[in-house]
Structures are given as structure tokens and as C-alpha cells.
Amino acid sequence: MDLHIVGGFLGSGKTTAIIGALKLLLAEGKRVGVVTNDKGRHLVDTAFFARATIPTTEVPGGCFRCNYGDFQERIAQLQDSARPDVIFAESVGSCVDLVGPVIQPLAALPGTGISKTTYSVFADSRLLRRRMLGLPMPYSDAICYIFDKQLEEASLIILNKIDLLSEVQIQETLSLAKTVFPDKVLLPQNSLIPKGTEAWVKLLAQSTITGIPLDVDYDQYGAGAAQLAWLDQTLTFTVDNGQGCSVVQRLIAGLVNILREEAAPIAHLKFFVQGEGEEVKLSFDSLTSSNEWQAALPSLTANTLTLIINARIQMAAERLRTLVGQVISETLTQAGIRYEETERSAFAPQVPKPT
């Protein structure tokens, strides 16, 4: 069995790329599995993969590095239940320092059934371009330290969302990246198109790319992680026929707009909407334009809908909790829509402590 660990900053498109890679492997007759990971405990990505009938386990409440034993157990669980030929393990987007504490010990451990482990680091091409050009970043210096260290640890960098750059910008970005990262494998990628992940999948099958062990200033790393508020919320509500899409649009637009009014950088904001026979996932980051997401939201005919929210925002956790509650109240309560909050948590991650 091959294990492909996927890292990279929040919002870099890891989940979309993994889905594309899995489709290619399934078409080849491969058995597959996924391990999701987050500092929170109610994950959009886990629901998304599970609804796609992909064998999925999760490591919640912390990264692979700080939950190494749980990570091993989830891999073994997938091996027992699904007997996969390939597992993709998606690391939480604020994590770094995986090679020494995770990848190398896994490779050295006998009896795991893992024949090969690879490590890919994803970067949003637009964000990487800004960093290489010395342009202002959406995030604080402490958070940018995490972004920089993820790239430093990589042997393989996927320049994802390359389709969001112009042809001139693409060529300039690739040229810059070859200069800034001369010893790394660089792969431009558009993960949204059917064959967009084909070159990546072939490279993983043919190579063993495991990254570069890091020296990390954990005080600086912890300071950056602490500036990102984590909010996870699940709510279920019932609407009149045909009103679901309008209500979800108002909820999402209200939350995105209020965060922008607060000038709070969005590292990643994910929504997963489920109704009977219907589902959709939407993702936002600091560079997402205000209206481009609405075209991706299909009509929702179910009367009862469940909405999972995963928000990773540069702001105080309690302030984020207050804002989300305000948007829900204004959108649902004032419209006379009854709803139930089944899960809600908001926190700032603690200083990472490698296992």
C-alpha cells in the first residue's frame, strides 16, 4: 500500500486535488482510502469524503504530528476495513514539521503494510506569487512563518489553482519559483478539471518524495497558530419548499461579508450543505472574490437542511463565535426559521507539542 501525505496552507486546494486523484485511481481499479485531519472535531472534509462513498477515517483535535499514535491507528483501521492500494492523508493546513516527527518514523516502522510514503506540499499559486514578489500578504508575519516553513519542508511543491492566474502571470510565477526553489520539484496544477491531477498521480506512483527535515522555532510557530481562530458549527433547519438555496445563500453571504467588514483575513472558510439526496461543498479564502461562489450553489429542494461550517480566521476566537451567532440569528431567527445547533466550538489552537 502507498501512503501519500498531503500538506500545505489552509485554502490551498488539497481536498479538491485529492478528490481528483482518487477519481483517477478508482478508474484504474485501485482501492483507495482517505485520512482527514484538523484541530477541530466536526470536519467538512470528513463529511464530504464519506458522502462520496470513499472509505474515510479522521484524526481530529490536532495534527498528525501531535497525534502520531492516532494517525497510525487510523491508517491501520482503513487497511483492515477497506484494504486500500493507496491512502491519501490530508494534514491540517496550519501544520508544519511532518517529515522528522511523522514521515521518517512511519517509513522506519516494520509491519505497517506501507510500501511507500510520499509528501506533497500544496500552495495557492496566487498566494505563493505574492510571497515571492514581496507583495503584501493577507496574514500576519507569524502566520506567514507557517506558510514559509511548509514550503521549506517540501521536496515537491504543487502550484495549485494555476488557472486563477493569467498566462503571463503563470509564466512569471513558474520562473520565480524555479529561482526561489531550485532544488525542489515544482508542479503547476488545476485540480478542478478531470485530468488536472493526472501528472501529480503519475509522479507519486513513480517517485518517493518525502520532504526535508526542518528546524522549527516552535515559539514563533505557536504564535502564528494562536492568531488563527478555529470555529466548527453544525446546524439543521427546516424551510418552505424551494427556499433552501436562498436561505443558504443569505447565511454564507452574511458571514463572508461580516468577516470582510471586520477586516479579518480568511485563511479558510468551508461550508458543507446536506439535504435529502442533495449536497454541496463551498470553500473561501482571503483571495476569493465576493460573488464567484454563488454559481456553484445548486438549487436545494429539500425542506430540511444541515449546514456544517469550518472557519479558520485571523481574529479572536470569541469574536468569531459572536459574529457567526449574529449572522445565524439575523438570517434564520428574524425570518422565523427554526433551527437546531447540534455542534459548536470556537478556540485558538494551543502551542503544538510533537508526539
Image (cartoon, rainbow, N blue to C red):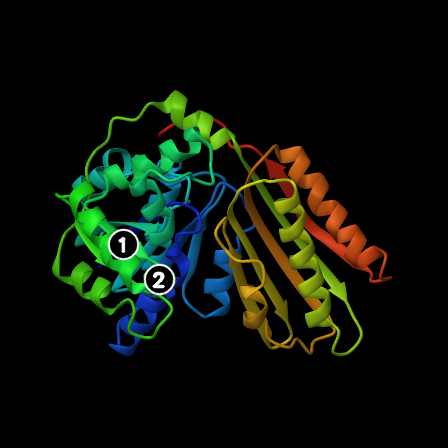
Lateral position of residue 318 relative to residue 4, left or right = right
Q: Cα distance, mark 2 to mark 1? A: 10 Å
Disc 2 vs disc 1: Cβ atoms closer than 8 Å?
yes
Q: Is residue 181 visible?
A: no
Query: Mark 1: few, some, or many residues within 10 Å (few <14, many ≥20)?
Result: many
Within the image, what quadrant is residue 98 found in?
top left
Q: Which one is earlier in the sequence, the residue at label 2 or at label 1?
A: 2
Q: How many marks?
A: 2
Residue pushed farthest front? 168
The residue under label 1 is which amino acid type?
A: Ile
Image height check: is 133 above or below 207? Answer: above
Q: Quadrant of the C terminus?
A: top left
Residue ID at (28%, 66%):
197
Q: Quadrant of the N terminus?
A: bottom left
Q: Say which of 132 and 108 sits in front.
A: 132
The numbered disc on residue 139 is none
Query: Mark 2: few, some, or many residues within 10 Å (few <14, many ≥20)?
Result: many
| Position of residue 147 measured from the top left corner of the image (x, y, whole percent) | 36, 39
Instruction: Give the residue number, with chain letter if any, for mark 1.
Output: 158
- Name the mark nearer the viewer: 2 or 1: 1
Q: Say which of 353 and 72 sits in front.
A: 353
Residue pushed farthest top? 219
Instruction: Give the residue number, with chain letter if any, for mark 2.
Output: 17
